[in-house]
Image (cartoon, rainbow, N blue to C red):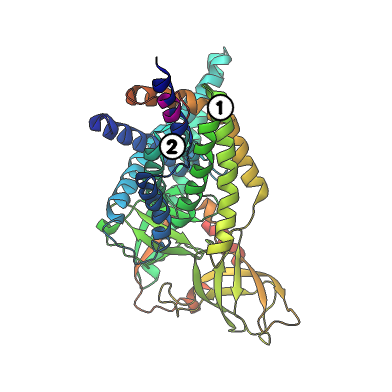
Amino acid sequence: MKNPGRFLLRWLVFFVLIHITVVMSTTLWPGFFHSIPAPKFWLIGLLFVLVYFPLREAILFAYLVGYSITFYSGTSPKMILFPILLIYLVVRPLKSRMFWQGNTYFVMTATLGALMFETLYVLFSKIMETNSTQVMFWDRLLSVLFVLVVSPLIYNLLFPILERLTPEESIHEQG
Amino acid sequence: MTRRQSLVMLLRYRCDLNFFSWDLKKIIFLVVILALPLLSINMEQKPNQDGWLAKPFQLVAGYFQQVFFTFSDSVRSPTAQYLNLVDIKKQSENLKSRNHELEARLQVMGELERENERLKKVLEFKETYNMHLLAAQVIGKDLIPDHNSITINKGTDNGLKTGQAVITLGGVLGYVFRPEKTTAHIMLITDRYAVVDGIVQRSRAHGIVEGKNEGLTLKYVERTEDVKVGDLVVTGGLDNLLPKGFPVAVVENVERKTFSVSLKVDLKPVVDSTKVEEVLVVVDAKNVDLEPNVVDEPTGEIEAKTQ
């Protein structure tokens, strides 16, 4: 950690930003669109953190955010933290071998991450929960497609913020 | 650059690139990131969860939802009016725009009237039954679509505690599972983590009502029991969560499997949780048995009332 002040600011800003996306899904969306399921804006934010935050910081921050968002749901922390770990173990080694700048890279990685999240959620539910979730194929497919469509916008919104808050470490490189 | 320097640079570069090259720091880091999810297995969302670790997160979650609800509540009607006005501006006739404005007002009045009627019924309900009820407004829904929980605008400041029943005029909705200072999370009976004690009203067959993503199932009902499609299932009261005799669901399908000791009963909840705006938290029921009063009403009427 080269600059503790900036590190704390980065965590604080992204914590608040992701929580804003969470309340958009839980409070704002149902207020306007009632029973239409809310898109997972928060998942794109979380995937952005896993891809672009400094290597070790990414997973610890994702755990913190992952744990905190369980307070907006009836789900248990393990159902969020395990998928986060596995997504991290795929996207970061992938980034160390294959990386290019720009939003197309994020679109690709975020879609892969979203696909993994949905699959792992069902898988872990079947393994670890007594009354496990249903597959809900179309809902989950829609969720992944939503990530594919919206991730460039989220990238264009979040990347400049991260760039400003992380000048000492290059977020433009592999690793 | 000497040959030695370039060799050192190359080695360092290779080392940076290799995600799985091991040293003590990396091993400790890996142990930490593997340990945290394993620890999370013990952090189940138990109804009596009240740990120090959870407190700050509960506060943050409660605060965020409260603030955004206030914001969305104040923005919703001006947004609707603005959208109406955009439409009106396209039409040049002044009279039409005036007409639209009046219609919009009429809609607001109609909405207020309906809200007034709902609240009046709530008040009547509170006065009829010997229960200490607290009315609350739904301010949020569950973040994960395959879970069914809602957030209400009352919390521990209003005397809410874990395990208190949450009902509507038509039937059972769920129970408080995570009260916070100004808000509370309600586990709906349709959530797959939720279970309540249930009785088939007509035949008194006992079972456990368990949530599934869409609807409910009545489990552990003996094969020999008399259960028919259309039967009303009411709360059994043995779970110490919900007052006895309150409508839960209607039997939708009964399956008698040859090699099973119990029936497979699918239920349809009497309350459509997606349409609920106001709820009642049973602060104190004092072992009230609602059965003689509430279940006399046909299910259709109950549903209509809720909506």
In depth, the one of B267 and B168 nearer the eye is B267
Give above or below for B127 relative to B85.
Answer: below
Q: Which residues are magenta?
A: B8-12
Query: B53 above or below A47?
Result: below
Q: Is residue B11 magenta?
A: yes
Count the numbered circles shown: 2
Residue located farthest toward the top when viewing the structure as drawn:
B92
Identified at 58% across, 79% down, the residue is B201
Image quadrant where one finds the C terminus of chain B:
bottom right
User: Under tag 2, what secondary structure?
Assistant: helix
Left of A13 or right of it: where is A115? right
Q: Position of A170 compared to A106: left or right?
A: left
Q: Is residue B303 magenta?
A: no
Q: Residues within 10 Å of mark 1 (few under 14, many from 20)?
A: some
Does residue B263 appear anywhere in the picture? yes
Q: Residue at x 64, y 52 (%)?
A: A136
Q: Residue at x 47, y 62 (%)?
A: B169
Chain on which label 2 sits? A
Picture disc at residue A105: 1
Quickly name the residue at label 2. Answer: A21
State whether residue B198 is above or below residue A99: below
- The type of residue carrying mark 1 is Tyr
| Residue that sits furthest to the bottom in the current view | B224
Q: Quadrant where the N terminus of chain B lies?
A: top left
**Residue lying farthest front?**
B3
Say whether residue B182 is left or right of residue B224: left
Please state the horizontal and vertical placement of residue B139, each as a whole percent of the image: 41, 47
Q: CA distance from mark 1 to mark 2?
A: 22 Å
Give the percent coordinates (x, y) of residue B245. 49, 76
Q: Quadrant of residue A50?
A: top left
- Local crowd size for mark 2, using a 10 Å CA cut-off: few (<14), some (14–19), many (≥20): some
